[in-house]
Image: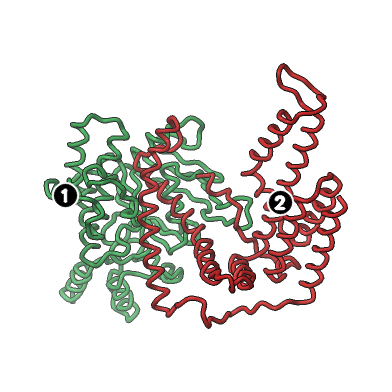
Amino acid sequence: MRILRNISFGQYIPRDSLIHNLDPRIKILSCLAIIISLFLITKFSGYLILGSFVLISIIISKVHPKFVFRGLRPILFIIIFTLIIHLFMTEGEVIYQLGFLKITQEGLVKGLLISFRLFILILATSLLTLATSPISLTDGIERLLAIFKFTGIPAHEIAMMMTIALRFIPTLLEETEKIMKAQISRGADFESGNIFNRAKNLIPILIPLFVNAFRRADELAIAMEAKCYRGGEGRTHYRELKIKKADISTFVSTIVITIIVSVMF
Amino acid sequence: MFIHLEDMYFTYSLGMPFETEVLKNINLEIDKGEFIGLIGHTGCGKTTLIQHFNGLLTPTSGKIYVEGVDLNKKGVNLKLVRQKIGLVFQYPENQLFEETIYQEVAFGPKKLGLSEEKIKKRVREALKMVDLDYNLYAERSPFSLSGGEMRRVALASILSIRPKMLILDEPTANLDPQGRDNILSEIKKIHYNFGMGVVLVSHNMEKVAETVNRLVVMHRGEIIMDGAPRDIFEKHANELIEVGLGLPQVTECMHKLKEKGKDVYTGVLTVDDAEREMLKKIKNK
Protein backbone atom coordinates (compact mmCIF):
# COMPACT_ATOMS: atom_id res chain seq x y z
CA MET A 1 0.00 0.00 0.00
CA ARG A 2 2.91 2.28 0.67
CA ILE A 3 4.01 1.96 -2.96
CA LEU A 4 0.85 3.60 -4.19
CA ARG A 5 1.32 6.64 -2.01
CA ASN A 6 4.77 7.43 -3.34
CA ILE A 7 3.94 7.90 -6.99
CA SER A 8 4.78 11.51 -7.71
CA PHE A 9 4.81 11.30 -11.49
CA GLY A 10 1.92 13.22 -12.94
CA GLN A 11 1.19 14.91 -9.64
CA TYR A 12 0.54 18.62 -9.94
CA ILE A 13 1.70 20.94 -7.17
CA PRO A 14 -0.06 24.29 -7.35
CA ARG A 15 2.13 27.33 -6.73
CA ASP A 16 2.15 30.89 -7.98
CA SER A 17 5.38 31.15 -9.94
CA LEU A 18 6.76 32.20 -13.30
CA ILE A 19 7.00 28.57 -14.43
CA HIS A 20 3.45 27.77 -13.36
CA ASN A 21 2.01 30.75 -15.19
CA LEU A 22 3.77 30.06 -18.49
CA ASP A 23 1.73 29.00 -21.48
CA PRO A 24 1.64 25.17 -21.51
CA ARG A 25 2.69 25.11 -25.17
CA ILE A 26 5.83 27.05 -24.30
CA LYS A 27 6.57 24.66 -21.46
CA ILE A 28 6.10 21.58 -23.61
CA LEU A 29 8.22 22.93 -26.45
CA SER A 30 10.96 24.10 -24.09
CA CYS A 31 10.99 20.69 -22.44
CA LEU A 32 11.19 19.09 -25.89
CA ALA A 33 14.10 21.35 -26.84
CA ILE A 34 15.95 20.38 -23.66
CA ILE A 35 15.36 16.67 -24.34
CA ILE A 36 16.61 16.93 -27.93
CA SER A 37 19.75 18.80 -26.91
CA LEU A 38 20.37 16.22 -24.15
CA PHE A 39 20.90 13.65 -26.88
CA LEU A 40 23.18 15.92 -28.91
CA ILE A 41 25.57 16.87 -26.09
CA THR A 42 28.76 14.83 -25.89
CA LYS A 43 30.68 16.59 -23.11
CA PHE A 44 30.28 16.89 -19.35
CA SER A 45 30.43 20.68 -19.49
CA GLY A 46 27.34 20.71 -21.71
CA TYR A 47 25.41 18.65 -19.18
CA LEU A 48 26.65 20.92 -16.43
CA ILE A 49 25.24 23.99 -18.16
CA LEU A 50 21.94 22.37 -19.10
CA GLY A 51 21.63 20.73 -15.67
CA SER A 52 22.08 24.03 -13.89
CA PHE A 53 19.54 25.60 -16.25
CA VAL A 54 17.00 22.96 -15.20
CA LEU A 55 17.94 23.37 -11.52
CA ILE A 56 17.46 27.15 -11.74
CA SER A 57 14.03 26.53 -13.33
CA ILE A 58 13.16 24.25 -10.41
CA ILE A 59 14.10 27.00 -7.95
CA ILE A 60 12.07 29.59 -9.89
CA SER A 61 9.06 27.23 -9.92
CA LYS A 62 8.89 27.32 -6.07
CA VAL A 63 8.15 23.57 -6.10
CA HIS A 64 10.13 22.00 -3.29
CA PRO A 65 13.11 20.13 -4.86
CA LYS A 66 12.10 17.16 -2.67
CA PHE A 67 9.11 16.52 -4.95
CA VAL A 68 11.10 16.90 -8.14
CA PHE A 69 13.77 14.50 -6.97
CA ARG A 70 11.14 12.06 -5.75
CA GLY A 71 10.35 11.47 -9.43
CA LEU A 72 13.86 10.06 -9.80
CA ARG A 73 13.34 7.25 -7.35
CA PRO A 74 11.57 4.78 -9.66
CA ILE A 75 14.18 5.13 -12.41
CA LEU A 76 17.19 5.14 -10.11
CA PHE A 77 17.49 1.44 -10.77
CA ILE A 78 17.60 1.98 -14.53
CA ILE A 79 20.26 4.68 -14.17
CA ILE A 80 22.46 2.47 -11.98
CA PHE A 81 21.89 -0.51 -14.27
CA THR A 82 22.96 1.36 -17.42
CA LEU A 83 25.94 2.79 -15.58
CA ILE A 84 27.09 -0.70 -14.57
CA ILE A 85 26.52 -2.13 -18.06
CA HIS A 86 28.57 0.64 -19.59
CA LEU A 87 31.30 0.35 -16.97
CA PHE A 88 31.96 -3.30 -17.68
CA MET A 89 30.93 -3.77 -21.28
CA THR A 90 32.85 -1.02 -23.07
CA GLU A 91 36.13 -1.91 -24.76
CA GLY A 92 39.09 0.38 -24.15
CA GLU A 93 41.85 1.29 -21.73
CA VAL A 94 41.54 -0.76 -18.55
CA ILE A 95 41.76 1.26 -15.35
CA TYR A 96 40.65 -1.36 -12.84
CA GLN A 97 40.40 -5.13 -13.03
CA LEU A 98 38.67 -7.64 -10.78
CA GLY A 99 38.87 -11.17 -12.13
CA PHE A 100 37.24 -11.25 -15.53
CA LEU A 101 35.45 -7.93 -14.86
CA LYS A 102 37.28 -4.88 -16.08
CA ILE A 103 36.40 -1.24 -15.89
CA THR A 104 37.57 0.89 -18.78
CA GLN A 105 38.20 4.59 -19.06
CA GLU A 106 35.83 4.84 -22.01
CA GLY A 107 33.16 2.87 -20.18
CA LEU A 108 33.34 5.15 -17.15
CA VAL A 109 32.98 8.28 -19.28
CA LYS A 110 30.16 6.84 -21.40
CA GLY A 111 28.28 5.47 -18.40
CA LEU A 112 28.45 8.74 -16.51
CA LEU A 113 27.36 10.71 -19.59
CA ILE A 114 24.30 8.51 -20.06
CA SER A 115 23.47 8.68 -16.36
CA PHE A 116 23.57 12.47 -16.50
CA ARG A 117 21.40 12.38 -19.59
CA LEU A 118 18.70 10.28 -17.91
CA PHE A 119 19.01 12.29 -14.72
CA ILE A 120 18.37 15.65 -16.40
CA LEU A 121 15.70 14.14 -18.64
CA ILE A 122 13.65 13.03 -15.66
CA LEU A 123 14.19 16.29 -13.77
CA ALA A 124 12.98 18.35 -16.72
CA THR A 125 9.90 16.23 -17.41
CA SER A 126 9.03 15.98 -13.69
CA LEU A 127 9.18 19.75 -13.45
CA LEU A 128 6.87 20.01 -16.46
CA THR A 129 4.19 17.81 -14.89
CA LEU A 130 4.67 19.19 -11.36
CA ALA A 131 4.27 22.80 -12.48
CA THR A 132 1.52 22.34 -15.06
CA SER A 133 -2.01 21.33 -14.17
CA PRO A 134 -3.21 18.28 -16.13
CA ILE A 135 -5.93 20.35 -17.78
CA SER A 136 -3.61 22.99 -19.15
CA LEU A 137 -1.09 20.30 -20.12
CA THR A 138 -3.60 18.49 -22.32
CA ASP A 139 -4.85 21.84 -23.59
CA GLY A 140 -1.32 22.62 -24.70
CA ILE A 141 -0.89 19.22 -26.33
CA GLU A 142 -4.18 19.61 -28.16
CA ARG A 143 -3.17 23.00 -29.54
CA LEU A 144 0.27 21.76 -30.53
CA LEU A 145 -1.13 18.67 -32.26
CA ALA A 146 -3.65 20.84 -34.10
CA ILE A 147 -0.75 22.03 -36.27
CA PHE A 148 -0.65 18.53 -37.77
CA LYS A 149 -4.38 18.40 -38.37
CA PHE A 150 -3.92 18.35 -42.14
CA THR A 151 -2.23 14.93 -41.81
CA GLY A 152 -5.43 13.60 -40.25
CA ILE A 153 -4.28 13.46 -36.63
CA PRO A 154 -7.39 13.67 -34.41
CA ALA A 155 -5.86 16.25 -32.08
CA HIS A 156 -8.94 16.87 -29.99
CA GLU A 157 -9.75 13.21 -29.52
CA ILE A 158 -6.19 12.40 -28.44
CA ALA A 159 -6.24 15.28 -25.97
CA MET A 160 -9.63 14.20 -24.60
CA MET A 161 -8.38 10.64 -24.12
CA MET A 162 -5.34 11.97 -22.28
CA THR A 163 -7.46 14.22 -20.09
CA ILE A 164 -9.70 11.32 -19.14
CA ALA A 165 -6.76 8.99 -18.53
CA LEU A 166 -5.00 11.56 -16.34
CA ARG A 167 -8.20 12.35 -14.53
CA PHE A 168 -8.72 8.71 -13.57
CA ILE A 169 -5.18 7.88 -12.43
CA PRO A 170 -5.78 9.11 -8.87
CA THR A 171 -9.26 7.56 -8.83
CA LEU A 172 -7.93 4.18 -9.86
CA LEU A 173 -5.06 4.39 -7.37
CA GLU A 174 -7.46 5.24 -4.60
CA GLU A 175 -9.73 2.41 -5.60
CA THR A 176 -6.88 -0.08 -5.83
CA GLU A 177 -5.87 0.85 -2.32
CA LYS A 178 -9.42 0.45 -1.08
CA ILE A 179 -9.92 -2.94 -2.74
CA MET A 180 -6.53 -4.09 -1.46
CA LYS A 181 -7.48 -3.14 2.08
CA ALA A 182 -10.85 -4.84 1.75
CA GLN A 183 -9.30 -8.07 0.49
CA ILE A 184 -6.63 -7.97 3.19
CA SER A 185 -9.48 -7.70 5.71
CA ARG A 186 -10.94 -10.84 4.12
CA GLY A 187 -7.69 -12.71 4.66
CA ALA A 188 -5.84 -12.05 1.38
CA ASP A 189 -2.08 -11.74 1.56
CA PHE A 190 -0.09 -9.67 -0.92
CA GLU A 191 3.26 -9.61 0.80
CA SER A 192 4.47 -13.18 1.04
CA GLY A 193 4.89 -16.21 -1.20
CA ASN A 194 6.88 -16.73 -4.39
CA ILE A 195 6.40 -14.70 -7.54
CA PHE A 196 3.75 -17.03 -9.04
CA ASN A 197 1.69 -17.07 -5.89
CA ARG A 198 1.95 -13.33 -5.64
CA ALA A 199 0.72 -12.92 -9.20
CA LYS A 200 -2.17 -15.25 -8.45
CA ASN A 201 -2.96 -13.28 -5.32
CA LEU A 202 -3.52 -10.20 -7.44
CA ILE A 203 -6.68 -11.65 -8.98
CA PRO A 204 -8.91 -10.48 -6.10
CA ILE A 205 -7.70 -6.93 -6.83
CA LEU A 206 -7.65 -6.95 -10.61
CA ILE A 207 -11.12 -8.35 -11.26
CA PRO A 208 -13.02 -5.85 -9.10
CA LEU A 209 -10.82 -3.07 -10.46
CA PHE A 210 -11.66 -3.97 -14.06
CA VAL A 211 -15.34 -4.48 -13.36
CA ASN A 212 -15.53 -1.05 -11.74
CA ALA A 213 -13.44 0.63 -14.43
CA PHE A 214 -15.71 -0.65 -17.19
CA ARG A 215 -18.79 0.39 -15.29
CA ARG A 216 -17.31 3.82 -14.73
CA ALA A 217 -16.34 4.21 -18.39
CA ASP A 218 -19.88 3.35 -19.37
CA GLU A 219 -21.33 5.91 -16.98
CA LEU A 220 -18.88 8.56 -18.16
CA ALA A 221 -19.79 7.97 -21.81
CA ILE A 222 -23.49 8.34 -21.02
CA ALA A 223 -22.84 11.48 -18.97
CA MET A 224 -20.82 13.02 -21.80
CA GLU A 225 -23.51 12.27 -24.32
CA ALA A 226 -26.13 13.72 -21.99
CA LYS A 227 -24.07 16.92 -22.02
CA CYS A 228 -24.15 16.87 -25.83
CA TYR A 229 -20.47 16.10 -26.28
CA ARG A 230 -19.77 15.51 -29.97
CA GLY A 231 -16.03 15.79 -30.43
CA GLY A 232 -13.80 18.77 -31.07
CA GLU A 233 -15.57 20.39 -33.99
CA GLY A 234 -16.68 23.93 -33.24
CA ARG A 235 -15.76 23.50 -29.57
CA THR A 236 -14.62 26.62 -27.73
CA HIS A 237 -12.45 26.81 -24.63
CA TYR A 238 -13.17 28.31 -21.26
CA ARG A 239 -9.49 29.08 -20.85
CA GLU A 240 -8.05 30.66 -23.99
CA LEU A 241 -4.31 30.26 -24.32
CA LYS A 242 -2.49 33.50 -25.03
CA ILE A 243 1.22 34.02 -25.51
CA LYS A 244 2.53 36.67 -23.11
CA LYS A 245 5.84 38.52 -22.92
CA ALA A 246 7.19 36.17 -20.28
CA ASP A 247 6.40 33.23 -22.54
CA ILE A 248 8.37 34.66 -25.44
CA SER A 249 11.41 35.56 -23.33
CA THR A 250 11.44 32.13 -21.63
CA PHE A 251 11.10 30.33 -24.93
CA VAL A 252 13.82 32.38 -26.63
CA SER A 253 16.27 31.93 -23.75
CA THR A 254 15.62 28.15 -23.62
CA ILE A 255 16.12 27.78 -27.36
CA VAL A 256 19.30 29.88 -27.31
CA ILE A 257 20.78 27.87 -24.43
CA THR A 258 19.86 24.50 -25.90
CA ILE A 259 21.25 25.39 -29.35
CA ILE A 260 24.48 26.70 -27.85
CA VAL A 261 25.05 23.61 -25.70
CA SER A 262 24.13 21.21 -28.53
CA VAL A 263 26.41 22.86 -31.06
CA MET A 264 29.38 23.77 -28.88
CA PHE A 265 29.55 20.87 -26.46
CA MET B 1 -11.64 -5.09 27.02
CA PHE B 2 -11.60 -6.02 23.35
CA ILE B 3 -10.32 -2.93 21.56
CA HIS B 4 -8.52 -0.18 23.41
CA LEU B 5 -7.28 3.06 21.81
CA GLU B 6 -5.01 5.39 23.73
CA ASP B 7 -4.21 9.02 22.77
CA MET B 8 -4.27 8.13 19.12
CA TYR B 9 -3.42 10.64 16.36
CA PHE B 10 -3.31 10.07 12.64
CA THR B 11 -2.07 12.31 9.82
CA TYR B 12 -2.55 11.51 6.14
CA SER B 13 0.31 12.05 3.64
CA LEU B 14 2.79 12.97 6.33
CA GLY B 15 5.44 15.24 4.84
CA MET B 16 3.54 15.77 1.57
CA PRO B 17 1.96 19.02 0.39
CA PHE B 18 -1.52 17.71 1.13
CA GLU B 19 -0.77 16.68 4.72
CA THR B 20 -3.91 16.63 6.87
CA GLU B 21 -4.52 15.65 10.46
CA VAL B 22 -7.47 13.27 10.34
CA LEU B 23 -7.67 11.90 13.87
CA LYS B 24 -6.98 13.80 17.05
CA ASN B 25 -6.62 12.53 20.60
CA ILE B 26 -8.76 9.41 20.20
CA ASN B 27 -9.41 7.47 23.40
CA LEU B 28 -11.87 4.63 23.08
CA GLU B 29 -12.64 1.37 24.80
CA ILE B 30 -14.79 -1.27 23.16
CA ASP B 31 -15.88 -4.37 25.05
CA LYS B 32 -16.54 -7.76 23.56
CA GLY B 33 -20.07 -8.13 22.28
CA GLU B 34 -21.00 -4.47 22.34
CA PHE B 35 -23.36 -2.95 19.77
CA ILE B 36 -21.98 0.46 18.88
CA GLY B 37 -23.00 3.16 16.42
CA LEU B 38 -20.13 5.35 15.22
CA ILE B 39 -21.68 8.53 13.91
CA GLY B 40 -20.19 11.57 12.24
CA HIS B 41 -20.20 13.69 9.13
CA THR B 42 -18.68 12.53 5.88
CA GLY B 43 -14.96 13.22 6.18
CA CYS B 44 -14.85 13.38 9.97
CA GLY B 45 -12.47 10.41 10.17
CA LYS B 46 -14.83 7.49 10.87
CA THR B 47 -13.49 5.31 8.07
CA THR B 48 -9.91 6.20 8.93
CA LEU B 49 -10.54 5.29 12.56
CA ILE B 50 -11.96 1.84 11.88
CA GLN B 51 -9.08 1.00 9.56
CA HIS B 52 -6.83 1.27 12.59
CA PHE B 53 -8.78 -1.44 14.40
CA ASN B 54 -7.37 -4.24 12.27
CA GLY B 55 -3.99 -2.75 11.48
CA LEU B 56 -4.66 -1.51 7.94
CA LEU B 57 -3.44 1.91 9.05
CA THR B 58 -0.81 2.71 11.63
CA PRO B 59 -1.38 5.72 13.91
CA THR B 60 1.06 8.62 13.74
CA SER B 61 1.19 8.49 17.53
CA GLY B 62 -0.69 6.69 20.28
CA LYS B 63 -1.48 3.04 20.95
CA ILE B 64 -3.98 0.44 19.84
CA TYR B 65 -4.60 -2.78 21.74
CA VAL B 66 -6.76 -5.65 20.53
CA GLU B 67 -7.35 -8.19 23.28
CA GLY B 68 -4.36 -6.70 25.07
CA VAL B 69 -1.99 -7.03 22.11
CA ASP B 70 -0.26 -3.84 20.96
CA LEU B 71 -0.86 -3.70 17.20
CA ASN B 72 2.13 -1.50 16.45
CA LYS B 73 4.69 -3.69 18.09
CA LYS B 74 7.02 -5.36 15.62
CA GLY B 75 6.24 -8.95 14.76
CA VAL B 76 2.55 -8.82 15.71
CA ASN B 77 0.52 -11.27 13.64
CA LEU B 78 -1.94 -8.89 12.01
CA LYS B 79 -3.59 -11.79 10.18
CA LEU B 80 -4.76 -13.10 13.50
CA VAL B 81 -6.15 -9.68 14.40
CA ARG B 82 -8.01 -9.54 11.08
CA GLN B 83 -9.65 -12.86 11.90
CA LYS B 84 -10.94 -11.43 15.14
CA ILE B 85 -12.15 -8.16 13.64
CA GLY B 86 -14.15 -8.44 10.45
CA LEU B 87 -14.13 -5.17 8.55
CA VAL B 88 -16.85 -4.64 5.94
CA PHE B 89 -15.97 -1.68 3.75
CA GLN B 90 -18.35 0.79 2.22
CA TYR B 91 -19.94 -0.62 -0.96
CA PRO B 92 -18.52 -4.08 -0.23
CA GLU B 93 -20.22 -5.41 -3.39
CA ASN B 94 -17.37 -3.72 -5.32
CA GLN B 95 -14.92 -6.31 -4.01
CA LEU B 96 -16.64 -9.40 -5.33
CA PHE B 97 -14.49 -11.28 -7.81
CA GLU B 98 -15.14 -15.04 -7.76
CA GLU B 99 -17.10 -17.10 -10.27
CA THR B 100 -19.68 -18.38 -7.83
CA ILE B 101 -21.13 -17.16 -4.59
CA TYR B 102 -19.86 -20.29 -2.88
CA GLN B 103 -16.27 -19.49 -3.83
CA GLU B 104 -16.76 -15.88 -2.88
CA VAL B 105 -17.86 -16.72 0.66
CA ALA B 106 -15.26 -19.50 0.91
CA PHE B 107 -12.38 -17.13 0.11
CA GLY B 108 -11.72 -16.14 3.73
CA PRO B 109 -11.97 -19.64 5.28
CA LYS B 110 -9.77 -21.01 2.48
CA LYS B 111 -7.10 -18.47 3.37
CA LEU B 112 -7.33 -19.72 6.95
CA GLY B 113 -6.34 -23.15 5.65
CA LEU B 114 -9.46 -25.00 6.77
CA SER B 115 -10.51 -28.37 5.40
CA GLU B 116 -12.99 -28.56 2.51
CA GLU B 117 -15.68 -29.87 4.83
CA LYS B 118 -15.29 -27.12 7.38
CA ILE B 119 -15.29 -24.50 4.63
CA LYS B 120 -18.56 -25.84 3.29
CA LYS B 121 -20.09 -25.71 6.73
CA ARG B 122 -18.99 -22.13 7.22
CA VAL B 123 -20.31 -21.04 3.83
CA ARG B 124 -23.71 -22.57 4.61
CA GLU B 125 -23.76 -20.88 7.98
CA ALA B 126 -22.67 -17.48 6.64
CA LEU B 127 -25.24 -17.49 3.85
CA LYS B 128 -27.90 -18.43 6.36
CA MET B 129 -26.90 -15.51 8.57
CA VAL B 130 -27.62 -13.07 5.75
CA ASP B 131 -30.84 -14.85 4.73
CA LEU B 132 -29.68 -16.24 1.42
CA ASP B 133 -30.75 -19.80 0.58
CA TYR B 134 -27.67 -21.97 0.06
CA ASN B 135 -29.28 -24.24 -2.53
CA LEU B 136 -30.56 -21.34 -4.58
CA TYR B 137 -27.52 -19.13 -4.47
CA ALA B 138 -24.33 -21.15 -3.96
CA GLU B 139 -23.65 -21.87 -7.63
CA ARG B 140 -24.78 -18.54 -9.06
CA SER B 141 -22.39 -15.81 -10.17
CA PRO B 142 -22.18 -12.94 -7.70
CA PHE B 143 -22.38 -10.52 -10.64
CA SER B 144 -25.87 -11.74 -11.54
CA LEU B 145 -27.36 -10.48 -8.27
CA SER B 146 -29.19 -7.30 -7.37
CA GLY B 147 -27.33 -4.60 -5.42
CA GLY B 148 -28.85 -5.58 -2.08
CA GLU B 149 -28.11 -9.27 -2.60
CA MET B 150 -24.53 -8.52 -3.63
CA ARG B 151 -24.06 -6.59 -0.44
CA ARG B 152 -25.36 -9.53 1.59
CA VAL B 153 -22.95 -11.88 -0.17
CA ALA B 154 -20.11 -9.48 0.63
CA LEU B 155 -21.25 -9.45 4.25
CA ALA B 156 -21.40 -13.26 4.29
CA SER B 157 -17.84 -13.41 2.94
CA ILE B 158 -16.69 -11.61 6.10
CA LEU B 159 -18.96 -13.60 8.43
CA SER B 160 -17.47 -16.86 7.16
CA ILE B 161 -14.20 -15.87 8.84
CA ARG B 162 -16.17 -15.94 12.11
CA PRO B 163 -14.88 -12.68 13.55
CA LYS B 164 -15.53 -11.81 17.18
CA MET B 165 -16.41 -8.29 16.19
CA LEU B 166 -18.00 -7.04 13.00
CA ILE B 167 -17.32 -3.50 11.80
CA LEU B 168 -19.54 -2.17 9.04
CA ASP B 169 -18.82 1.06 7.17
CA GLU B 170 -22.09 2.63 5.98
CA PRO B 171 -23.74 -0.75 5.37
CA THR B 172 -26.99 0.87 4.21
CA ALA B 173 -25.52 3.42 1.78
CA ASN B 174 -27.22 3.50 -1.63
CA LEU B 175 -29.90 0.95 -0.72
CA ASP B 176 -33.63 1.50 -1.01
CA PRO B 177 -35.61 1.66 2.27
CA GLN B 178 -36.49 -2.04 2.12
CA GLY B 179 -32.92 -3.13 1.42
CA ARG B 180 -31.77 -0.88 4.24
CA ASP B 181 -34.22 -2.37 6.74
CA ASN B 182 -33.27 -5.90 5.65
CA ILE B 183 -29.56 -5.31 6.20
CA LEU B 184 -30.15 -3.63 9.56
CA SER B 185 -32.38 -6.42 10.83
CA GLU B 186 -29.84 -9.01 9.69
CA ILE B 187 -27.11 -7.14 11.57
CA LYS B 188 -29.34 -7.06 14.64
CA LYS B 189 -29.92 -10.81 14.35
CA ILE B 190 -26.21 -11.46 14.00
CA HIS B 191 -25.61 -9.46 17.15
CA TYR B 192 -28.36 -10.93 19.30
CA ASN B 193 -28.34 -14.54 18.05
CA PHE B 194 -24.62 -15.07 17.71
CA GLY B 195 -23.33 -12.62 20.29
CA MET B 196 -21.06 -10.94 17.80
CA GLY B 197 -19.89 -7.43 18.66
CA VAL B 198 -20.90 -4.87 16.07
CA VAL B 199 -19.69 -1.38 15.23
CA LEU B 200 -22.04 0.34 12.84
CA VAL B 201 -20.53 3.34 11.07
CA SER B 202 -22.93 5.88 9.63
CA HIS B 203 -23.49 9.57 8.98
CA ASN B 204 -27.19 9.19 9.55
CA MET B 205 -28.66 9.19 13.07
CA GLU B 206 -32.14 8.19 12.07
CA LYS B 207 -32.07 4.39 11.89
CA VAL B 208 -28.80 3.72 13.68
CA ALA B 209 -29.75 5.32 16.99
CA GLU B 210 -32.65 2.94 17.61
CA THR B 211 -30.58 -0.07 16.59
CA VAL B 212 -27.48 0.24 18.78
CA ASN B 213 -26.82 0.25 22.53
CA ARG B 214 -24.05 2.81 22.56
CA LEU B 215 -23.34 5.84 20.40
CA VAL B 216 -19.92 7.28 19.68
CA VAL B 217 -20.14 10.65 17.95
CA MET B 218 -17.21 12.06 16.00
CA HIS B 219 -16.66 15.58 14.77
CA ARG B 220 -13.61 16.85 12.87
CA GLY B 221 -11.41 13.94 13.87
CA GLU B 222 -12.33 13.91 17.54
CA ILE B 223 -14.75 11.91 19.65
CA ILE B 224 -17.14 14.45 21.10
CA MET B 225 -19.77 12.19 22.69
CA ASP B 226 -19.91 8.63 23.92
CA GLY B 227 -22.82 7.01 25.69
CA ALA B 228 -26.25 5.42 25.50
CA PRO B 229 -28.38 6.89 22.68
CA ARG B 230 -31.14 7.95 25.09
CA ASP B 231 -28.74 9.83 27.34
CA ILE B 232 -27.09 11.56 24.42
CA PHE B 233 -30.40 12.64 22.92
CA GLU B 234 -31.67 13.85 26.26
CA LYS B 235 -28.60 15.77 27.39
CA HIS B 236 -26.62 16.73 24.30
CA ALA B 237 -29.36 17.51 21.78
CA ASN B 238 -28.19 21.09 21.26
CA GLU B 239 -24.59 20.07 20.69
CA LEU B 240 -25.68 17.52 18.12
CA ILE B 241 -27.65 20.15 16.26
CA GLU B 242 -24.71 22.57 16.54
CA VAL B 243 -22.29 20.22 14.79
CA GLY B 244 -24.95 19.68 12.13
CA LEU B 245 -25.76 16.04 12.83
CA GLY B 246 -29.28 16.67 14.03
CA LEU B 247 -31.61 14.31 15.86
CA PRO B 248 -34.00 11.61 14.69
CA GLN B 249 -37.31 13.23 13.77
CA VAL B 250 -39.29 11.83 16.75
CA THR B 251 -36.60 12.94 19.17
CA GLU B 252 -36.64 16.42 17.71
CA CYS B 253 -40.40 16.42 18.06
CA MET B 254 -40.15 15.68 21.78
CA HIS B 255 -37.58 18.42 22.24
CA LYS B 256 -39.95 20.89 20.57
CA LEU B 257 -42.72 19.80 22.94
CA LYS B 258 -40.45 20.41 25.88
CA GLU B 259 -39.58 23.86 24.54
CA LYS B 260 -43.29 24.61 24.47
CA GLY B 261 -43.41 23.88 28.20
CA LYS B 262 -44.58 20.25 28.21
CA ASP B 263 -42.60 18.22 30.70
CA VAL B 264 -41.73 15.18 28.58
CA TYR B 265 -38.74 12.85 28.56
CA THR B 266 -36.71 13.73 25.45
CA GLY B 267 -34.51 10.67 25.16
CA VAL B 268 -36.85 8.77 22.85
CA LEU B 269 -35.60 6.80 19.88
CA THR B 270 -38.66 5.52 18.04
CA VAL B 271 -42.21 6.56 17.31
CA ASP B 272 -43.40 3.80 19.69
CA ASP B 273 -41.25 5.25 22.45
CA ALA B 274 -42.71 8.68 21.90
CA GLU B 275 -46.25 7.32 21.87
CA ARG B 276 -45.73 5.52 25.18
CA GLU B 277 -44.20 8.62 26.72
CA MET B 278 -47.05 10.85 25.63
CA LEU B 279 -49.73 8.41 26.77
CA LYS B 280 -48.06 8.28 30.15
CA LYS B 281 -48.19 12.06 30.42
CA ILE B 282 -51.82 12.20 29.37
CA LYS B 283 -52.83 9.50 31.89
CA ASN B 284 -50.99 11.25 34.70
CA LYS B 285 -53.01 14.41 34.19
The amino acid pointed to by label 2 is: Leu
The amino acid pointed to by label 1 is: Tyr
Neighbours of disc 1 within 10 Å: few (<14), some (14-19), many (20+) = some
Question: Which secondary structure lies at badge 2?
Answer: helix
Picture colour for chain B: green
Residue at point 32%, 80% (across, down): B261
Q: Is residue A170 left or right of residue B113?
A: right
| Quarter assignment of residue A148 | bottom right
Residue at point 32%, 81% (across, down): B260
- The colour style of the image is by chain
Where is A145 relative to B198, above or below?
below
Quadrant for the N terminus of chain B, please: top left
**Residue at mark 2:** A121
Q: Residue B12 got which mark?
A: none
Chain letter of mark 2 equals A
**Residue A200 placement (x, y as % from top left):** 38, 38
Q: Is the Cβ of the residue at disc 1 closer than 8 Å to that at disc 2?
A: no
| Quarter assignment of residue A3 | top right
**Residue at mark 1:** B137
